[in-house]
Image (cartoon, rainbow, N blue to C red):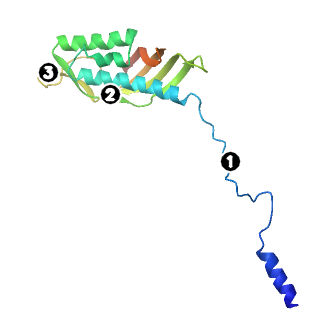
Amino acid sequence: MAGTIVLAALTACRPVESAQTSLAPPSFTASIDPLASVKDAILNAYRGMWRDFADAAHTADWNDPDIADHTTGDAEAKLRYGLFLASKKGQVVKGDPLLLSTRIAELKPENIPTKATIVDCVDDTRFLVHEKSGSKAKGGADVGRHHTTAVLTLRRGSWYVNSYILKEAGTC
């Protein structure tokens, strides 16, 4: 009987073989977005436009070469013209705009995009026009949250904001 108990004990300690037991690492089926790097480049260009514009607006330097780092066409012309007007009026902008809900709304064509549309809500309540003397400028457009749509194009391997529409304050 003692042999039976030992045999039972040894049998109980032996690992149970099953189809679920494996020494191989588990396999994961992670879905990697094949356009992730393209989307990052698009978002970086859009955010870069706002960063470059804010930096130039602090001194109202409409000739700032950095504006062209992330813009082209209508977008570049609009930014430079706004900075030109501020410079002529002796005004600068203090603070920075906040990009609250930046997202890519469309890629064309979808598989190898050369054009992208971004939708955002830009908050300019802390991006305010001041006289160069430091006092807040009177008048001007209302500040707040602006629904914004930007169109970016791929040119020579880099993404540029080609146009944008900044709606009136309170639209998002």
Q: Which mark is residue 97?
A: 2
**Callout 2, which amino acid?**
Pro
Which of labels 2 and 1 is toward the front? 1
Residue type (three-letter) at the residue carrying disc 1: Ser
- Measured as percent of width and height from the top left, residue 9 is found at 79, 81
Q: Quadrant of the C terminus?
A: top left
Disc 3 to disc 2, C-alpha distance: 19 Å
Q: Amino acid at mark 3?
A: Lys
Check residue 132 in the rendering and tell me which mark sits there, or answer none: 3
Task: Find residue 150 and name its label.
Answer: none
Residue 2: image quadrant is: bottom right
Q: Nearer the viewer, residue 8 or 51?
A: 8
Quadrant placement of the N terminus: bottom right
Q: Calculate the distance from the C-alpha at mark 3 to the C-alpha at mark 1.
A: 62 Å
Tell me which corner region of the image, top left, top right, bottom left or bottom right, holds residue 163.
top left
First in sequence: mark 3 or mark 1? 1
Q: Which residue is at 26% across, 24% downward?
A: 55
Q: Earlier in the sequence, mark 3 or mark 2?
A: 2
Q: Is residue 72 left or right of residue 18?
A: left
Q: Circle 1 — which element? A: loop
Cα distance, mark 2 to mark 1? 44 Å
Residue 80 horizontal/vertical position (percent): 29, 12
> At 80% from the left edge and 61% from the top edge, which residue is drawn?
18
User: Which residue appears farthest toward the bottom when viewing the image?
Assistant: 1
